[in-house]
Amino acid sequence: MAAPVPTPLAKLERIPPHIASVADYEELARQRLEPGIWAYLAGGAADERTLADNVAAFARYRLRSRVLADLSHGGTGLTLLGTRLSLPLLLAPVAFHKLFHPDGEAATALAAAAHAIPFVVSTQASTDLHSLARQAQGPLWFQLYIQHDRDFTLKLVRQAEAAGYAALVLTLDAPVNGLRNREQRTGFVMPPGIEAVNLRGMAPAPAATTLLGGPLLATAPTWQDLAWLRAQTRLPLLAKGIMHPDDARQALDHGIDGIVVSNHGGRILDGQPATIDVLAEIVAAVGGRAPVLLDGGIRRGTDILVALALGATAVLVGRPFAWGLAAAGALGVSHVIQLLRSELELAMALTGCADLAAISRSLLWNEGNAVKIA
C-alpha cells in the first residue's frame, strides 16, 4: 500500500467551494485516501458503537438561547497550564500524519500556530519531535505512552523538554491496542517510508500469545509508574483516557495537572459510553483541582459549547483536523479550526455569552436529562 502521492499545490491546496462545515471534509478525505488508510483513520474498535455514540451523544443536548446580552466585550481566549490559547481547542494526538498528507505533522503544526492553539504531537508521529519543534511557530505539547521500555520513556521525556514542548499528555487507556475490525478487513499495513520515528531504537515489546498473565501486560504501566513519571519532570502532566471518576481522583492524588476525558476516539474498548455523557461526573470528582478537557465526537462549535457548559475547560479534536489535512494540507487543517471557531463564537453570542466565563450549565435546556430526548 503506497503513501499519499503529492499533488500539485494548485490542485490540492485550496478549499473547495462546497465546504461549509467540518463534516463536509469527511467525504472529501475519504475520496483522497486509499481504502486501508481510510479504515485506519475513520475506524474504531470492534462494532464501532462507541465511535458512533461519541458523535451521536451531542445531539441529545439542547441549548437555551438568550437575548439582549451585552456582547461588546470578551472573546474566546484562555490560559491553560501556562499556555495561552485563542480558543478552548487543541489538536489531539493522531499518529502518522504522513499517511494523510506528504507534509505530515509539519502542516498540522503550521495550521495550529496560525490559530494560536496547541498541537499535541503523537509519540507515533511520522516526523521527529526535534525537527517539528524547530519548524513550529506555535505551542506544541507532547503525547506520551509509558512504554514497556521505561528508560526509553524517560528519554522521550527529556527530548520533549529539551525541544521546548510545553506539556506532556500521558495516554493511559491503551496498554494494548483495540481490536479494529475495519482495518483488518481492508488488510491495512503501514506503507513503506512511514514509521513512528520517535520510537527508533526502543527495545521491542515482549511477544505475547496470551494477554492476561502474559509478558506483554506484565510490563503495562501501573499507578506506581505514574508516580515515577511525575517525579521525573516539571512539565505540566495531563492524564488522557480517563472515563471513571475514581481514576480522575487517583490521578490527581498522583500529581497530575490536568484530566482528559477520552475513550481514545472509540478505538480501544468498544461499548464504552460517549465521553460527553461521563464528563459531568468526572468534573464533579475533580472538584476544581485541575482543568478537565474532553475529546471524542466534536464536530461543531455547538459541541464545544455543550462540553464547556458541562464543565470542560477545553476540548480536543482528532479525526476532523485529519480530514482537513488529507483534503488540503495545512490550509485544510486551518479551515477546520476556523469553522469550529466561527460556530463557537456564533453559539456563544446567541446564548448570551460574551466570554468563556459566562458559559454555565444554565445554557443546557435538558442538562442531566439528555438521553430522554434521543
Image (cartoon, rainbow, N blue to C red):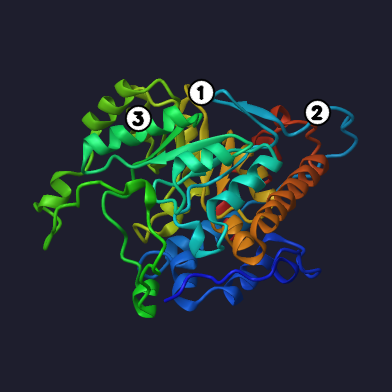
Residue 366 shows up from this direction = no
Q: Amino acid at mark 3?
A: Ala
Quadrant showing the N terminus: bottom left
* Image spot of residue 140 (x, y percent): 54, 36
Secondary structure beneath dot 2 equals loop
| Mark 3 → mark 2, Cα distance in angstroms | 33 Å
Q: Residues within 10 Å of mark 2 (few under 14, many from 20)?
A: few
Which residue matches tag 2?
A: 74
| Left or right: 252 in relation to 216 | right
Between disc 3 and disc 2, whose residue precedes? 2
Q: Position of residue 223 (x, y in %)?
A: 24, 32
Q: Which residue is mark 3?
A: 251
- Sequence-wise first label, 3 or 1: 3
- Give whichever of discs 1 and 2 has the lower sequence position: 2
Q: Give the residue type that dot 2 points to.
A: Gly
Report which residue position mark 1 lands on: 288
Q: Which label sits in the foreground, 1 or 2? A: 2
Q: Nearer the viewer, residue 123 or 63?
A: 123
